């Protein structure tokens, strides 16, 4: 069962908007056993949409379109879809009712004709109800193939995927089981890793694929297997992992959970241990706190954080002594450790992370080279720090520092369990 | 001049990685007058890559591929490209020298055969040197069309685009001028806006396209024009904007700069005024600080911030009085305003933003409904707050609150200029 995802919108083609819909949709399709063969982004242009539909129909069983369903003149997906199916638009009573409900609840204005017209759908289409917006999803079948059209607004699209598309696909197609397992590996380069596990890799059975995903100091190793016998697939992949792990025992860090990330793993561990966390950030500027609090349930372990961006605020707000800063510079192990210790106390937490460094592009309040970052971890009993040189690309330096901070905390927690 | 961007990698097709390369590349191409006709993401699969190259060659003049150039067995782009061009791989001395330089500088290990083999390129290709990595970019020409293959690692790809691909494309093709101008409009829905400006929109000349991009309480209106006479294009678009602005004078907020966002605009204004900013965040969890500090130069106006996530930390660290919290609940105008006032003082800033609310999915330390967010702005002379109901989707609530906070501060700054 192969799918193609077609995202429609000039804003994608000029780079104004990054397409996040395709990745979401493919992840969800994989979970129900549907592989994605291709993702295609095209303009709001009738001829191009028609051509893309034709090409997709030749290759894929399931074609999912997003975008171009709004009420304005640049939205042409629905009319183009009707033309492709040689169909006409008819008013759908359930969709109109949904639009009236939304307007009553959220918009204090009478319905306009363009809003009413959003209830027009191709006569051959089934409605995929959009609870959060006026543009309905649509499902159309043709010679055993399915065409699904969804709004481009991510949260509307996601709700329709979850409540309408996935259940309907599961009921329509018999799909295999797809298993992706990703191992997080730190501290060894891609080619050294490949060399070390070469014999193991060469012995992998054909239906288990291996991929290397190197990124900012870590390599993710992904094993992918597919088949109709879920248990068999799981066992086979587990066997391969069992023989891989001894080869990377000092570098293996854990598994990437399907919807997870290191901060979610960390959070779960802290909750389990009944411990709390605080942060004091300089060069990471709040990104550590932001990544932690992006996840529901963070309040169970996250006390809070300080972003002491200016040197003076490290003194005034965080209580780092001016003497330490003068003696060692603001980018130093001593300052990082003082920040972590003080944050621990201020927030009365069990663990604290602190960062101080220079993310660039220019030197700041210290003479530290661009990319130099000190990260400290404080606990109730001790404090320690490490220094990293994280390159000279601002966004990369910040992201790498955030990753390193989470890794250091993770190691500290694991050491004490 | 039309381009197609082909991104290669199973990690994209299973949704493990979001493709940000395509948006970056298309933005850069637009700047030199090259339109992107299609973006295509495909698997690390030889047959599929060959098919995508063939389809792209039929439609586009410039084909840019990213990904699949690494040293491991799942990287097959280079060999496939050689096959497509009926070519063989030869060792390039300049690439090998670059790899040796990188290994000497960064990797304390002898070169392996797989690393040396990264210096193999198709004999018909010109090298696009990769200063940051071992996989070279490649440029191949065929019947007036150009095929460009770049590594998938974003910062390596970006450096090659900037230093090699764009100058070479400009020298090879005569390209038109493309102008995108985006107006930020707040406080009016997409369909109401469309109705209001309908006459203006209908009178737009054919070569100026209008697009609506609604998102979380704002609509971006984008005008796109293309032509060989840069000054003429600019004048024509300016004329259209001049006749549009009176129709949206209460909702027009500013122009979206090419590489800009509201926090960059805000930062520039604050620097110009010589004013500073601090933040105290609860439900936004550090995201306001993170968005501010993601931009170089933030240290010129950003003093720092507090993430007082736990109620107790609002008392202990930020000094909000327990009496106020008990009397009004932690999610209240009074607490938001106290947080902003105290942050202003703590950081000795000219402006402070504070947020307190419930981002969901469940009720927290107060009885406030999920989605309720109070945002306060404090200045040296006054403090005020607004309350918003931002829906029940956690990530959306946080992002909307961040946008609202920046909008409120922007309005306050504009009022006083």
Image: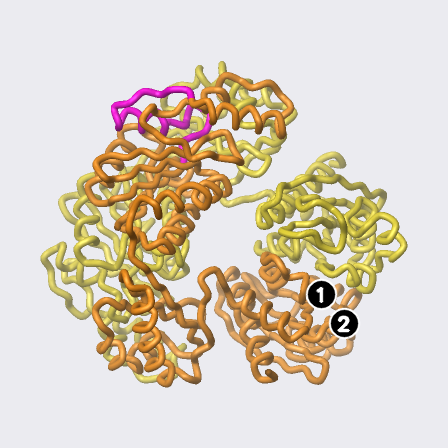
Chain colours: A yellow, B orange
**Magenta stretch encompasses residue A25:** no
Residue visible at 18% across and 63% down in the picture? A79
Quadrant in which the N terminus of chain A is drawn: top left
In depth, the one of A382 and A374 nearer the eye is A374
A111 displayed left or right of B264? left
Q: Which residues lie in the magenta part?
A: B67-91
The chain identifier of the residue carrying mark 2 reads B
Which sits earlier in the primary sequence, circle 2 or circle 1?
1
Q: Inspect this view and state whether residue B43 appears.
A: yes
Q: Position of residue A100 (x, y in %)?
A: 31, 77
* Position above or below: A51 against A177: below
Residue A106, percent from left and from top: 40, 77
Say what secondary structure mark 2 lies in: loop
Please report the residue visible at 37 percent of the width from the left and 85 percent of the height from the top. Answer: B246
Q: Residue furthest right?
A: A323
Asked if labels 2 and 1 share a chain, the reply is: yes
Residue neighbourhood size for the residue with mark 1, other residues' Cα within 10 Å, grouped as few (<14), some (14–19), many (≥20): many
Label 1 belongs to which residue? B303
Mark 2 burial class by Cα count in 10 Å: few <14, some 14-19, many 20+: many
Q: Where the C terminus of chain A falls, by quadrant?
A: top right
Residue A26 occupies which quadrant of the picture?
Answer: top left
Residue A159 falls in image quadrant: bottom left
Residue A217, x across and y down, in percent = 59, 35
- Residue B134 position, x and y percent, is 50, 29
Residues at marks 2 and 1 touching, judged by CB atoms closer than 8 Å: yes
**Residue occupying the point 31% across, 27% down:** B124
Q: CA distance from mark 2 to mark 1?
A: 8 Å
Q: Is A338 left, or right, of B94 in this rendering? A: right
Q: Which residue is mark 2?
A: B348
């Amino acid at each position: 069962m192969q799918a193609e995802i077609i995202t429609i919108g000039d804003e994608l083609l000029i780079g104004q908007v990054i397409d996040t819909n395709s990745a979401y949709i493919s992840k969800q399709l994989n979970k129900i056993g549907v592989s994605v063969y291709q993702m295609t982004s095209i303009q709001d242009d009738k001829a191009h949409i028609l051509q893309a539909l034709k090409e997709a129909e030749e290759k894929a069983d399931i074609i999912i379109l997003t975008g171009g369903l709004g009420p304005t003149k640049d939205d042409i997906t629905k009319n183009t879809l009707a033309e492709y199916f040689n169909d006409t638009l008819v008013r759908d009573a359930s969709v109109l009712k949904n639009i009236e409900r939304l307007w009553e609840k959220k918009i204090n204005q009478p319905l306009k004709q363009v809003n009413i017209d959003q209830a027009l759908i191709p006569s051959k289409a089934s409605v995929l109800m959009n609870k959060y917006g006026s543009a309905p999803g649509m499902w159309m079948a043709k010679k055993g193939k399915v065409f699904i059209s969804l709004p481009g607004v991510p949260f509307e699209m996601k709700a329709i995927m979850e409540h309408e598309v996935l259940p309907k696909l599961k009921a329509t197609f018999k799909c295999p089981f797809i298993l992706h397992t990703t191992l997080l590996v730190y501290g060894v380069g891609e080619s050294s890793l490949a060399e070390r596990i070469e014999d193991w890799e060469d012995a992998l059975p054909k239906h288990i694929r291996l991929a290397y995903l190197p990124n900012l100091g870590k390599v993710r190793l992904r094993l992918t297997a597919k088949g109709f016998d879920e248990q068999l697939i799981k066992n086979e992949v587990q066997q391969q992992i069992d023989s891989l792990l001894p080869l990377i025992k000092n570098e293996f860090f854990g598994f990437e959970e399907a919807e997870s990330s290191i901060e979610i793993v960390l959070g779960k561990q802290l909750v389990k241990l009944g411990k709390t966390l605080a942060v004091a950030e300089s060069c990471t500027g709040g990104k550590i706190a932001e990544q932690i609090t992006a996840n529901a349930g963070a309040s169970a372990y996250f006390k809070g954080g300080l972003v002491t961006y200016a040197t003076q605020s490290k003194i005034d707000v965080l209580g780092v002594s001016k003497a330490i800063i003068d003696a060692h510079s603001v980018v130093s192990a001593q300052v990082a450790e003082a920040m972590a210790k003080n944050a621990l106390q201020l927030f009365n937490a069990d663990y604290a992370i602190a960062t101080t460094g220079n993310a660039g592009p220019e030197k700041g309040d210290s003479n530290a080279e661009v990319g130099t970052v000190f990260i400290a971890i404080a606990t109730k009993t001790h404090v320690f720090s490490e220094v990293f040189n994280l390159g000279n690309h601002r966004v990369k330096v910040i992201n790498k520092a955030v990753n390193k901070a989470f890794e250091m905390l993770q190691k500290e927690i694991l050491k004490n369990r």
